Every structure is written in structure tokens, then in C-alpha cells.
Image (cartoon, rainbow, N blue to C red):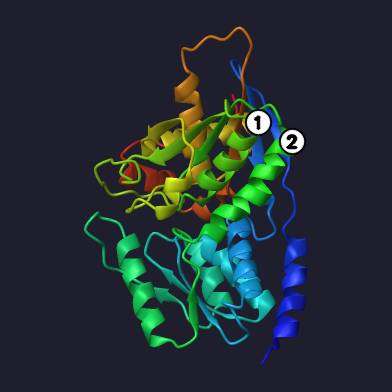
């Protein structure tokens, strides 16, 4: 078994894996638009940061020891990041998934975890999150020495974005005026908004959610694209400093993903398309003496969404619209 000393040594290796991601400027006719490329994190998404930070803090406090079993509910990215870091740390990890998880993520997790649990029962909102959370609690009661990373409630995840993501934004764009952030577990919007508001109280934090998510009091509705939205209001949301909220239909998410691909050569996932769509609708028709500086995060790559967002047959059958042709004009 790995000793605590070896666990701390491996944790130091993980510290070096978390690297600063670049901010690039995109062409836009009305605003000074920037994208932070979080898909360039080592495991491939913005979830690398809270996954590692939660494990790091848990180990440093002694809550996680060499024989701890890590358990988490996830629709994909967070579980993949946990799987990679738990493998590095030689910790056992059990992800709890549902049918919406992208097939590539499920395959990755089954290749990297001895035990994967997949629920198939919808909850009362039409989603699977509450079912996953009930399964997590059941596993916790059955497995001695287990630890739930609990991305929806663990403040360590929020602190990761305060200390890492938010600090990097300030270094790259200290005078940013608008930051658009997708919301699911609420760790990103809570951590980033707090550090940016401390630096500049006037910065506008615009939260973005998917139509059918209940986070901001909407009526629940079946959602098909993972990565944004939730069947619960995440407890971490109470720490967020939000100025406005934009709700985006999934059909607009799809259109935005294709626009990011054809206009900006960014092959991104559904949550990024949702946020980009929110930016376009938010500033549509507005006029400025000087284009405002706007930032959004590219949370993950589009490869995990080839089966749905970038699949015309899936789009036609699930969203009842024709998929845009991804060819630049």
C-alpha cells in the first residue's frame, strides 16, 4: 500500500500538471472578445482544476489517506479528471454515471477505474442527477473509509477557481469588463466571480444556464446536452457574485458550437457553445462608444460531443432541427 509520504510525493507531481491556460482574442464585430482555452488543461477540461484541488486539500487535511476510496457523481469531465489524478495518487476511485455521459468519457472511465456505477432511473425533474446522488450516498454507507469529493458543495472546488482560474484571468486581462460563465456545479462561477469582484467591483459577471435546468428557478425540462445546467440548485451558488443570468435553448447551443468551429476554428463542447450563444444574444443590438472587453471559458473539446452536437442525425431526432453545415463560407 502507498504510504502517506509517497502520497504527498505524488501530490507534488500533480501540482506540476496543473498549468496556466492561454487567453486568445477572437474576431467579433461589436465587442473585444476573448476566450480562455480551458480544454488545454492536462486531462482536457476545466474540471481538472477542482478535481485536483479537492484531492489536494483532502490529503493535506488528512481526510484522504492512502487506502481511501474516492466516490463522485459526474456527467463526464469531473469524473475523468478525478480518474486521472486518483491513478497518479494510487487511490481507488468509483465514478457514478448516467445514460447522458458521452460514450468517449464512459469508455475512458471504464478503462481507468476498477469499478464504475451507472444509474438508469430518471429523477422527478426528468434528469439523473438526484438518482446519481442517491447512489453516491448508498455507496458511502457501504464502503468504509470512502470520501465523497462532492463537486456541488465542496468549497475546495470553488477555491480552485479562486486561486487558479480567476487569478490567471486577472493576469491575462486585468481590465476585463464582462465575464460569461456557464453554471453546473457552480464552483467556477463562485470562485472566479469572487476573485474578480475583489479586484474590480464593477466587472460584470454573467451566469449562463441551459433551458430546462432548475439552477435559477426555471421549470425542469429534459435536457440532451451534458456539461451545463443541473437538476438541483447547487449549494456553492450562494457564494457566487452574479450580475445577470442568460438562459439558452439547446438549439441555440448547437448553432453556437458550429459557429465557433467555422468562424473561430474552435472545436468545443456543448457548455462552451451555450456560453458563446449567451454572449451573442446579450450584446445583440447594443451600441458602445468603445467595444467592451469580454471573456468566456472554453471548458472542453468537442470530441466528446461527436455523437450528439456534431451528429446531424442525432440533432434531427432529438432537437428536431437541421444541423448547420460546418463549412466556412
Position of residue 25 relative to residue 42, above or below, is above
Whether residue 202 is visible, yes or no, is yes
Position of residue 65 relative to residue 306, above or below, is below
Whether residue 45 is visible, yes or no, is no
State the residue at coordinates (75%, 83%): 6
State the residue at coordinates (38%, 48%): 314
Q: Position of residue 176 (x, y in %)?
A: 65, 28
State if disc 1 and disc 2 touch (CB < 8 Å). yes
Q: Position of residue 87 (x, y in %)?
A: 64, 77
Label 2 SS:
helix
Please name whichever residue, 179 or 159, is drawn nearer the observer in this view of the structure: 159
Q: Which residue is mark 1?
A: 34
Quick one: label 2, few (<14), some, or many (20+) residues within 10 Å? some
For the N terminus, the quadrant is: bottom right
Q: Which mark is residue 172?
A: 2
Label 1 SS:
strand
Q: Quadrant of residue 34?
A: top right
Q: Residue reaching furthest top?
A: 289
Quick one: label 1, few (<14), some, or many (20+) residues within 10 Å? many
Position of residue 270 relative to residue 293, above or below, is below
Amino acid at each position: 500500500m502507498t504510504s502517506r509520504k509517497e502520497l504527498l510525493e505524488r501530490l507534488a507531481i500533480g501540482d506540476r500538471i496543473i498549468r496556466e491556460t492561454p487567453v486568445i482574442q477572437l474576431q467579433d464585430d461589436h465587442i473585444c472578445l476573448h476566450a480562455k482555452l480551458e480544454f488545454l488543461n492536462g486531462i482536457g477540461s476545466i474540471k481538472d482544476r477542482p478535481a485536483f484541488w479537492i484531492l489536494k486539500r483532502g490529503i493535506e487535511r488528512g481526510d484522504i489517506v492512502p487506502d481511501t476510496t474516492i466516490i463522485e457523481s459526474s456527467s463526464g469531465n469531473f469524473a475523468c479528471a478525478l480518474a486521472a489524478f486518483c491513478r497518479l495518487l494510487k487511490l481507488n476511485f468509483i465514478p457514478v454515471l448516467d445514460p447522458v455521459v458521452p460514450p468517449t468519457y464512459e469508455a475512458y472511465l471504464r478503462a481507468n477505474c476498477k469499478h464504475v456505477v451507472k444509474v438508469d432511473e430518471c429523477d422527478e425533474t426528468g434528469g439523473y442527477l438526484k438518482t446519481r446522488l442517491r447512489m453516491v450516498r448508498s455507496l458511502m454507507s457501504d464502503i468504509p473509509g470512502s470520501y465523497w469529493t462532492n463537486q456541488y458543495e465542496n468549497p475546495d472546488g470553488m477555491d480552485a477557481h479562486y486561486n487558479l482560474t480567476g487569478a490567471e484571468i486577472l493576469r491575462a486581462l486585468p481590465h476585463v469588463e464582462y465575464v460569461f460563465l456557464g453554471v453546473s456545479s457552480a464552483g467556477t462561477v463562485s470562485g472566479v466571480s469572487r476573485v474578480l469582484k475583489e479586484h474590480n467591483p464593477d466587472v460584470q459577471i454573467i451566469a449562463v444556464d441551459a433551458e430546462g435546468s432548475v439552477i435559477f428557478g426555471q421549470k425542469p425540462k429534459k435536457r440532451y446536452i451534458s456539461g451545463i445546467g443541473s437538476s438541483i440548485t447547487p449549494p456553492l451558488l450562494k457564494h457566487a457574485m452574479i450580475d445577470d443570468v442568460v438562459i439558452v435553448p439547446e438549439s441555440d447551443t448547437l448553432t453556437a458550437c458550429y459557429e465557433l468551429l467555422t468562424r473561430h476554428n474552435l472545436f468545443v463542447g456543448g457548455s462552451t457553445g451555450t456560453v458563446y450563444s449567451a454572449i451573442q444574444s446579450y450584446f445583440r443590438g447594443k451600441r458602445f462608444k468603445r467595444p467592451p472587453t469580454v471573456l468566456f471559458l472554453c471548458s472542453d473539446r468537442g470530441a466528446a460531443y461527436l455523437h450528439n452536437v456534431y451528429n446531424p442525425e442525432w440533432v434531427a431526432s432529438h432537437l428536431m432541427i437541421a444541423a448547420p453545415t460546418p463549412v466556412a463560407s
